[in-house]
Image (spheres, helix red, strand yellow):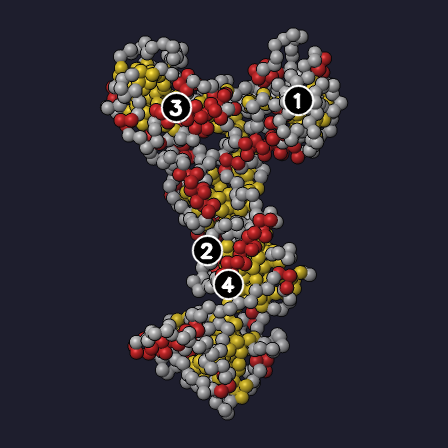
Amino acid sequence: MPRRVVLEGAGPGSRVLVVLEGAGPGFRVPAHMTRVPISLIATDADFSQRTVQGTVVRKGRLVSLASGNALLKTVLQEEDAPPPNASINVVLFGALAKDFDQAVNQGDVVVASGFTVGRSPTVHKDKLHPFNLLLSGDDARVYVSRPPLPPPPPPPPLVRSPPANRKRSAAHAEVSMATKAPKYTYVGLDGLKSGLVVNTYGVVVFFKQPFRSCGTDVCSTLKITDQSNQRISCSVFDAKLENHPKVFRVGDIVRLHRFKVQFFNNSMTLVNTFGFSVLAFDGAEGGSMEPRTSSRSFHLDQEGHRAVEELRTWAAGQALLPPAPSTPLSAAQPRAYFDLTCQLLAKAPIDSTCTLLRVWDGTRCAHTLLKVTVEPDTTEGPTRFSEGRERLIANVLVYDNHVELAARLKPGDFLRIYNLRAIPGSSKVLGRPGSQQQDQEVDHLAFHLHGGTAYGRGVRVLPESSPDVQEMKRVMEAVPDEDDFSELNDSQLLEVWSTPPEFAEAESIQCSTDRSCGDDPRTARLSDLKRSDPGLVHQVRVQLRSYEPRRLHQALKLYCSKCMAMRDVPNDELVARLFSEASAAAPGPGGPPAWALSGRVPVPTERPASPPRAVGVAVPTERPASPPRAVGVHLSTQLLGEDRPTELLFLSGSTLEETRRLASGYRNVVPVRSSGGHMTLLDLSAPFLFRGRKRYFGCKRCSEASVREPLYAEGEEPLDEKGLAAALGVQLLQFVLLMKLELQDATDTLDVFLWRDAESFFGVSAEDVAANQEAENSIRQKMDSLCPAGGSAGGRPWVDLCVAAYRAEGQTCYQVCRRSITTNQRSKVTS
């Protein structure tokens, strides 16, 4: 005999009856009632002695009305009934709605009696039955059928349960099925059949962030694949954003539950049904197995872990994961579309269709960025940052449908912005009034997130636990706190001490390592030095408390002696991209210049001992074995006639790595590209000249570059970088070392700048540091000896320095002129 179970909270008067023995709901329904098919429900019949049976395929939330009443809406689907009227909306009121909410689960089979029939106002939207079932009053009943509970496991041997525990176990045995993990069957993407509701796993190959659909729902779309190589589109419709897939990048893995297979546009698609769920996982091998979901009731067993790991291994072999999840600001290039992982610092509305997001990722863009001015009272978040931090901040303008999401973002959120576009532009800088300086057009780069969802365009908030966020935070942590003046990084040094730092009267203060501090030969205390007037050089005995940058390769800069500009040395990633773009560009019309002899040269797989032989050019050398491909070369006919074939090579169509290999066999290698029928240099963000392991850069502002034959007389000294730069119209940039030292003595601390005499200080040239790891290591060793990591002040040596004080941009600054080292035992060490 079936048992009636009153679930917790339903109360003894509940009109929701649960049958647990699997005998079927008919055994509890009064005998005088008969079942009516859902398809025959209409308003012109009497259903007081009739019942309706179906599976709960959707269960809405309980709604409390202002009158103190309650309402709940559910959908019943009749098994094996023909469409379109196989499903019907059921609306429950009052205490029955509350009992149903507590006692019935989605997927239960129920029988309803005592209902009335009304017209459905949502028939055109949900495409269900044109009528609703309304259950209210004392006659309404719901009978629920569930499979029987599994037998309890046998108790452990020789252990008896106390009576109280046995009673509690019996009381809860009949409702334990609510927490028992269900068993699911999964289908591969090659086994999908139209009309089925399935569970499946897949690797994401394309996705769009959730966007507002034409109705009240929010829609997100995916395209997934698996070992069958089938690619299936998936659509999720739900009004709640938290129920949508939390996919962060291509290669993520998703588990889909209760998705219906449909045939649409001549292909299979998956669409969520009532009770659906989605789990998302990091797709990288060895990544976290913690699923991304807002649900608290999901179940993931060992079979699920194994399915995810198998897909990760397979996807890695198929190269489905992108090499990098996003592009940092330091690698952003004009006209490029890219994904950006960043942190939101502040935001402000521009108008109803545009919002400004101020973001950073710990790196600095190589291009001048667009400045956007907004009213402070409209800004959410800080309105001002230090000048150094401003150099690391990008202004992102988001438009149209993305404005709604931007309104929900909070300063401090970690974001991934998809399909962000870098747009080059220019702005006018006005000349100073009363001077002859003309207005200038200054190039800048602007970041725009256009409206729409094409190419996955959108914004996603990333959790702080994301591996990509953790990596970005490590980069950010290496940028010192902007509020701590003693911890400024190298980009902020250029702001504080001017760019580059200059003495107010360079001729009157000539500091060098082979003269004493003639202006004030006495040893000064730092507290006295800080109170003295600018324009003097002081001798101090100090210890090195700290220095910046800690990553010493960042101390290497490029300096233009003409416009006094200083910039970072471009990293290999940026340079390689410029070479690849030049290599991929189609050659324009026209031929090589008249003074050049052109041909093709095979690229060696390893560094050759002598330069390779150019095809069509008489170069007496040995050709490397099995070259993978050949690139274009142009040689000076005059140099060939003087039997100096390795003196100068113009190289086109090569990658950065290929240029490196060929530079070992030629004294001077100049990368070029074809533009407008003429041979031109690459963008001056890339090196314009390779000499062995050394690279040379030019100033974009001061150069008037053009490819022409250098002028030289017979018997002249070999060409060097200065002569070639002059011949090519390039203003040569000089490698310099730029550091900030924090000095201390018993009276005070002082921040000083090390620049002009940095090479003498370290005993190596900046040019050698750029080309030689050993030179950089020697700097590191010297800094470690002066400022040991974790060492106390008593363990640091004393340093005798000459420090010059000067005025720059309205403040007093200090720069090192010379130095010698004195140990704690007062023995002097000269280096």
Q: CA distance from mark 3 to mark 1?
A: 38 Å
The C terminus, quarter of image: top left
What's the residue at 46%, 47% (across, down)? Answer: 467
Front: mark 4 or 2: 2
What amino acid is labelled 2 in the image?
A: Glu
Q: Earlier in the sequence, mark 2 or mark 1?
A: 2
* Image height of 91 relative to 278, above or below: below
What amino acid is labelled 3 in the image?
A: Lys
Furthest-bottom residue in this view: 32
SS state under label 3: helix
Front: mark 4 or 3: 3
Where does label 1 land, which residue? 611
Q: CA distance from mark 4 to mark 1?
A: 63 Å
Q: Quadrant of residue 362?
A: top left
Q: Position of residue 724 (x, y in %)?
A: 60, 17
Where does label 4 land, which residue? 277
What's the residue at 62%, 56% (across, down)? Answer: 227
Q: Earlier in the sequence, mark 3 or mark 2?
A: 2
